[in-house]
Image: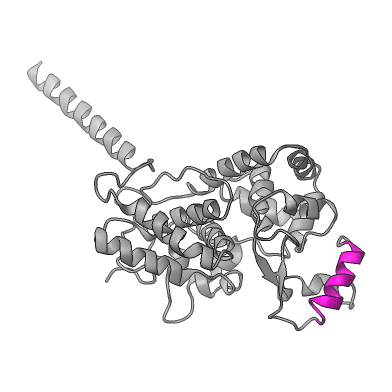
Amino acid sequence: MKMRSQSSFKVLSLCLLALVASTHAQLQLGFYAKSCPKAEQIILNFVHEHIHNAPSLAAALIRMHFHDCFVRGCDGSVLLNSTSNQAEKNAPPNLTVRGFDFIDRIKSLVEAECPGVVSCADILTLAARDSIVATGGPFWKVPTGRRDGVISNLVEARNSIPAPSSNFTTLQTLFANQGLDLKDLVLLSGAHTIGVSHCSSLSNRLFNFTGKGDQDPSLDSEYAANLKRFKCKNINDNTTKIEMDPGSRKTFDLGYYRQVIKRRGLFESDAALLTNSVTKSQVTQLLQGSLENFFAEFATSMEKMGRIKVKTGTEGEIRKHCAVVNS
């Protein structure tokens, strides 16, 4: 009887330990409250100090966060360098991603305060949120405790990140692969309300849509004519920048959806939102609602995205430098 009770006690203890371990391994608000209490403030202070000198970085950082989460989850793998140019940042979708130095500078400050404690994945997630808030956009909760991945693969990035030329079926599939639904697709696309793109992202829509020197009929013809006259003057222009939400690219608002409804979204992936009855209806509903409603809905989808396949507990590592795995 005594042996059985001891055995039962051991099983119960193991179950409790497993429960504690799994609980510990979840993301939580204020994860660094004891291990590095100043971490989140250091990140916030740096963002506030520098983002107003380069407000376009807010769009760049949220894009980087998005591209990170869509490949192996939100694990900072987009930040890694490769000696053979085979990392995520070398993939076509990431060649125009910027802000790596910004994250590296924050990391050095956090490391000086608490060496080896705060992950690059968490720093990127917090900096993306803080930069959007600092430039007048929505706030969302960022539970922390992410660990850094040690694998970064060009092919995975190329296959997992939606391209500007993606059609609805591709978008739906790539989002579903990350546990995101059509509502998340519409809301996260709303981040296109800030920032710029390059002519190369839509040159085919303007000059060679089906390979016959034609224009994408889903793009408003008057808008297309203006783009070709004043911005993207030929198919080989890879440097000219275009506002994704003309007239309010620095303001996080509903302007992007107004452009989409008018068939003036820059990308095929923007136009694709009108090709499905569910997403088209959601775009319309957002425009009929308040800015506060959009902010709240966007925040929910950002929190959801920030949890994609996160590494916690003993998975991955806490990198000393964001661009290289620990030796």
The image quarter containing residue 113 is bottom left
- Residue drawn at x 57%, y 46% is 138
* Quarter of the image where the N terminus is located: top left
- Residue 63 at least partly seen: yes
Instruction: Classify residue 15 as left or right of residue 154.
Output: left
Depth check: 264 or 169 in front? 264
Quarter the C terminus occupies: bottom left
Q: Position of residue 199 (x, y in %)?
A: 74, 75
Q: Is residue 271 above or below residue 227?
A: above
Q: Residue at x 79, y 42 (%)?
A: 284
Residue 227 on the magenta span = yes
Q: Is residue 327 left or right of residue 204?
A: left
Q: Residue at x 49, y 76 (%)?
A: 86
Q: Quadrant of residue 214?
A: bottom right
Magenta residues span 220-234
Q: Nearer the viewer, residue 82 or 134?
A: 134
Q: Residue 170: x and y, percent?
A: 70, 56
Q: Nearer the viewer, residue 252 or 257?
A: 252
Residue 285 position in % (x across, y down): 76, 38
Secondary structure predominantly adopted by residues drawn in magenta:
helix
- What residue appears at the point 48 percent right and 66 percent down from the top-left corner? 78
Is residue 288 located in the magenta-colored stretch of the structure?
no
